[in-house]
Image (cartoon, rainbow, N blue to C red):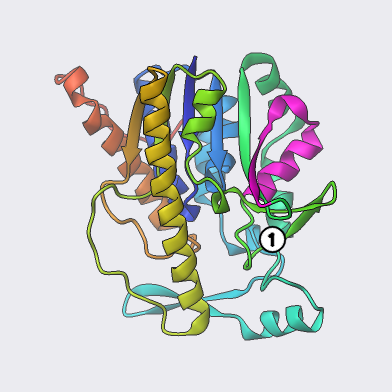
Amino acid sequence: MKALVISGGGSKGAFAGGVAQYLIEQKGRAYDMFLGTSTGILLVPHLASNDIGKLYDVFTNVNQNSIFSINPFVVKKKNGREYVYINYLSTILQFIKRKRTFGESKSLRKSIKKNFTQEEFNRIRETKEDVVVTVANLSKNRTEYKSINDFSYEEFCDWIWISCNYIPFMSLVKRNGFEYADGGLGCVVPIREAINRGATEVDAIILESENLEYNKVLGKNPFSLMINLFGHLLDQVEKGDITIGKLAALHKNVTLNLYYTPTKLTENSLIFNKVLMEKWWMEGFLYAQEKHEDDNPLSSTVPIRPEI
């Protein structure tokens, strides 16, 4: 059984879209199971329903308004680069309301329902083995995996949304008496879960470079410094997930193919820029093509915008 796993990574998910497009359309990979964390789970339902053209349009057009109902960020350009600053007005309003997060992401919940339909949900359940969402149960201090086969359409859309809620900047959600947040707080790359669910071959797209050394530009205010700190912690979780996944694959004789980003795409994956995301999608396609050139050195495919 073949599984596709996509890690968390915010706007860098566009790169994963390009890699997945190449694997599915050019290499003919037919996946039985799809697993994702955070931005990864935004991608996999459309990949599972085999609608890459729709996915391209949806994902590359994501912006702050389609995510935040209360936006804690202000994005400003300086010397040709984009920087994130705190939105003091919205943050103060959250404190006045006695909320525990700087922002709210209810717009993302609406976007998920708008772009992932009941018909697509039903088709996936009929044609695929599984689609699995990674979430963090903060009340029980554990990572949980939610299968499309165990929930209704409305419930599954909620789990997708919850997996993307990067607290304390997005919504903290209560379900069944427990409080949940971004799956990346517990597992960024659910390779081991795919193997535990019976995968015999796993393609894992990891939205971080493997060995690239660089000096991180730290935030110049407490808010942006907090974003840097969270990014550092998630990087450590991700490395642990990959190591555990490799060991699980070795132990159970599972074929594991890893696809990293060849460069550092961005220092802040919470910035959603259409031009950059379209560029990253193409780079993902080309990277996957280059990685597989040895399979057929005479073959070369020009990456194009997916057909709708």
Find disc 1 in the rendering and name its residue: 105
58 vs 194, nearest the viewer: 194
Task: Decide if residue 213 is on the left or right side of residue 217.
Answer: left
Instruction: Please tell me which residue lies in front, 115 or 210.
Output: 210
Q: Position of residue 277 (x, y in %)?
A: 42, 52
For the record, the magenta segment spans 141-163
Query: Residue shown at 47%/54% (left/top)?
Result: 11
Q: Is 190 or 285 nearer to us in this picture?
A: 190
Q: Is residue 243 above or below residue 222?
A: above
Q: Position of residue 62 (x, y in %)?
A: 56, 54
- Residue 299 visible here: yes
Residue 167 is a magenta residue: no
What secondary structure do most residues of the magenta stretch adopt?
Answer: helix
Q: Closest to the observer: 239 or 217?
A: 239
Give the crowd class for mark 1: few <14, some 14-19, many >=20 residues within 10 Å.
many
Question: Percent from the top left, x then y, of residue 15?
Answer: 39, 44
